[in-house]
Image (tube, coloured by chain):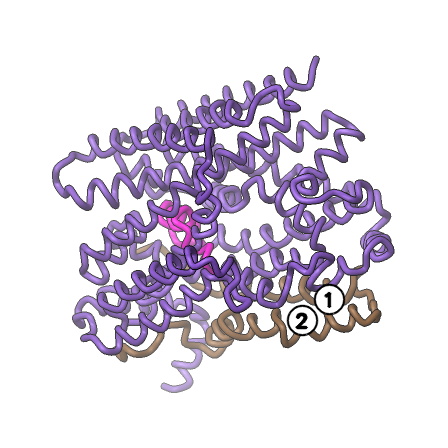
Chain colours: A purple, B brown
């Protein structure tokens, strides 16, 4: 059997299995938007963990991260550093957001901010901002998945056709089952690609005869791989700090992460999911490091995209079947991100644009159909974009974390009662203006050695605090409804035994 | 309610965790501290810890510490039925 036929067989089998999951999930559906977008807020701990992890990792884990470790060495270890505290931040942001979502019926960040700050303008602004950034990001993911398919078939299937085939499969199961389909396929995809990565890690560790031998061999080939800024001088301290700052806390506010916090069955479920991401995410990046350094020793001299495909290149020689399995794992990782983004983009367009700007015009059933229509429409747009990706696409992709400026208004809603509506609007507008100006100014990605997104983040923090302090605070009952509730049900629930003991001593 | 105060866990352990993840983490994983180990290795002093150069062990060790602190924080958080 030819390699292309084998790949098509795997993809065909995969399409059938995810379609079965989609059909099964749709039969369990209650036919409401809450069920379609949030699985009726009944997702258990295991599904929460896998869907959180699988949507976090895209094909980047198996290709991009491998290429970065391979090319730049030590610098890429920042991925371990920024994922280690992720579980903490997922909990600190996601926990209160989950509780407030259940109490007030929020489904998105825009709902939360609109309700807390009592501002429809703010809700609409946030909804549009997230749609603006997430849709182009979704389109680039389709291009990546098409490329993986093209590579798997040695070019027999073009990347455009690959994007159409795999995009249609994702669209089918998201359309049929919404969040339930996404969560169950994420479980399947997550187990698959994590097992592949971990097995490969132990394979390379065994092959090199342990960690010490691996590093000694690496040092003998190129010593600059084990220090910053790396062989090509890429990882300056500014780059290291920028990536750490952007990727440490901000993933907690990614719309797909927040969707999972809302979908969790209860706070304990969300806690368990956060607890396991705390070890799974950094440990997997350590495994990727071992794989990449092993590859650097066995297939040296690769650069750019070749380095990203080092794993495939190595196993194409050693065992082509394993190379296909690795590509299938890359596709699974990519699809698990795409399905999450597709559903979340559809949710924001339906609930934060259509429902918000035309309140009361549609029934819940009609909104569900609109959401499903958006799922198809977004797939068509994303696939069409992959045919001729515009030049600005890469820039907009980098701006995904521009939505990080929402961290300040969200922090206001869950932990800083003095924040105001005016502060929140000014903060978002400032960040957008700074990002737009720096993007078109031609100053490059790093302005003054720091990533331009961080400048937007710093400035928006200052503006949020200053404008909030200069404007009247929110009404006391509104503050009590949020912060009083969270103080009783979240913040004061930490270390309860010690609190009780201290209280008894004081008495 | 003092509306200028940032809400966070009120016990010493809670405050320590918030300070660790909010401030200390950024200092110890960044230039001032990591720079020291990076320089050591760059100058040829390739001390191996846990089978890897000391700067790798430093970052991975700190990451393990952050994971451990996350476990402590989350396990000490009492969660019951949502209101």
Residue ID at (47%, 73%): B14
Residue ID at (63%, 23%): A155
Q: Position of residue A278 (x, y in %)?
A: 56, 56
Same-chain status of marks 1 and 2: yes
Determine which of the numbered discs, if any, sits on residue B34 in the image: 2
Q: For the residue carrying disc 2, how many other residues have a C-alpha within 10 Å: few (<14), some (14-19), or many (20+)? A: some
Residue A200: name its quadrant.
Answer: top right
Q: Position of residue A380 (x, y in %)?
A: 38, 28
Q: Give the chain letter at badge 1.
A: B
Task: Tell me the SS state at disc 2.
Answer: helix
Q: Position of residue A96 (x, y in %)?
A: 35, 60
Task: Tell me the SS state at disc 1.
Answer: helix
Cα distance in 3D space between marks 1 and 2: 7 Å
| CB-based contact (under 8 Å), mark 1 and mark 2 | yes
Q: Position of residue A111 (x, y in %)?
A: 26, 52
The quadrant the N terminus of chain A occupies is: top right
Question: Which span of residues is magenta-colored?
Answer: A249-270
Task: Decide if residue A442 is in sight here.
Answer: yes
The quadrant the C terminus of chain A occupies is: bottom left
Determine which of the numbered discs, if any, sits on residue B55 in the image: 1
């Amino acid at each position: 059997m030819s390699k292309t036929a084998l790949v098509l067989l795997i993809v065909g089998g995969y399409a059938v299995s995810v379609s079965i999951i989609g059909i099964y999930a749709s039969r369990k559906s209650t036919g409401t938007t809450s069920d379609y977008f949030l699985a009726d807020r009944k997702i258990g701990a295991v599904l929460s963990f896998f869907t959180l992890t699988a949507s976090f990792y895209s094909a980047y884990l198996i290709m991009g991260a491998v290429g970065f470790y391979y090319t730049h060495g030590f610098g890429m270890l920042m991925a371990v550093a920024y994922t280690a505290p992720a579980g903490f931040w997922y909990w600190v942001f996601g926990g209160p957001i989950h509780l407030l979502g259940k109490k007030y019926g929020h489904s998105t960040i825009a709902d939360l901010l609109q309700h807390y700050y009592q501002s429809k303008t703010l809700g609409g602004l946030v909804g549009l901002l997230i749609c603006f950034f997430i849709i182009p990001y979704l389109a680039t993911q389709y291009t990546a998945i098409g490329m993986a398919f093209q590579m798997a078939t040695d070019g027999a299937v073009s990347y455009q056709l690959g994007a159409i085939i795999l995009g249609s499969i994702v669209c089918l199961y998201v359309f049929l089952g919404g969040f339930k389909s996404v969560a169950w396929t994420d479980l399947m995809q997550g187990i698959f690609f994590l097992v592949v990565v971990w097995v490969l890690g132990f394979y390379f560790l065994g092959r090199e005869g342990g960690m010490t031998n691996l590093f000694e061999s690496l040092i003998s080939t190129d010593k600059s791989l084990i220090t910053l800024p790396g062989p090509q001088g890429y990882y300056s301290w500014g780059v290291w700090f920028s990536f750490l700052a952007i990727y440490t806390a901000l993933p907690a506010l990614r719309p797909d992460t927040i969707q999972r916090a809302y979908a969790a069955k209860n706070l304990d479920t969300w806690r368990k999911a956060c607890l396991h991401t705390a070890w799974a995410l950094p440990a997997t990046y350590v495994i990727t490091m071992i794989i990449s350094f092993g590859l650097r020793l066995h297939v040296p001299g690769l650069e750019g995209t070749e380095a990203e495909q080092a794993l495939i290149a190595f196993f194409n020689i050693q065992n082509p079947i394993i190379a296909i399995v690795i590509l299938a794992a890359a596709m699974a990782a990519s699809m698990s991100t795409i399905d999450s983004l597709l559903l979340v983009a559809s949710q924001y367009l339906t609930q934060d644009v259509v429902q918000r700007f035309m309140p009361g015009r549609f029934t819940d059933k009609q909104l569900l159909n609109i959401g499903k229509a958006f799922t198809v429409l977004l797939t068509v747009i994303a696939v069409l974009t992959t045919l001729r990706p515009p030049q600005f696409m890469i820039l907009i992709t980098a701006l995904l974390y521009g939505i990080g400026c929402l961290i300040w208004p969200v922090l206001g809603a869950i932990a800083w009662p003095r924040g105001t509506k005016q502060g929140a609007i000014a903060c978002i507008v400032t960040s957008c203006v700074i990002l737009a100006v720096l993007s078109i100014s031609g100053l490059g990605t790093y302005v003054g050695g720091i990533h331009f997104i961080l400048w937007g983040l710093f400035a928006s923090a200052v503006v949020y605090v200053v404008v909030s302090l200069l404007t009247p605070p929110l009404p006391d009952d509104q503050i009590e409804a949020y912060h009083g509730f969270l103080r009783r049900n979240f913040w004061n629930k930490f270390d309860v035994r010690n609190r009780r003991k201290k209280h008894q001593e004081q008495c | 309610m003092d509306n200028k105060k940032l809400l966070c866990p009120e016990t010493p352990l809670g405050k320590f965790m918030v300070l660790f993840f909010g401030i200390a983490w950024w200092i110890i994983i960044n230039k001032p501290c990591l720079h020291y180990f990076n320089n050591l290795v760059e100058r040829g002093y390739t001390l191996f810890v846990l089978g890897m150069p000391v700067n790798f062990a430093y970052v991975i060790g700190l990451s393990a510490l952050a994971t451990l602190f996350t476990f402590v924080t989350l396990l000490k958080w009492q969660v019951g039925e949502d209101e």
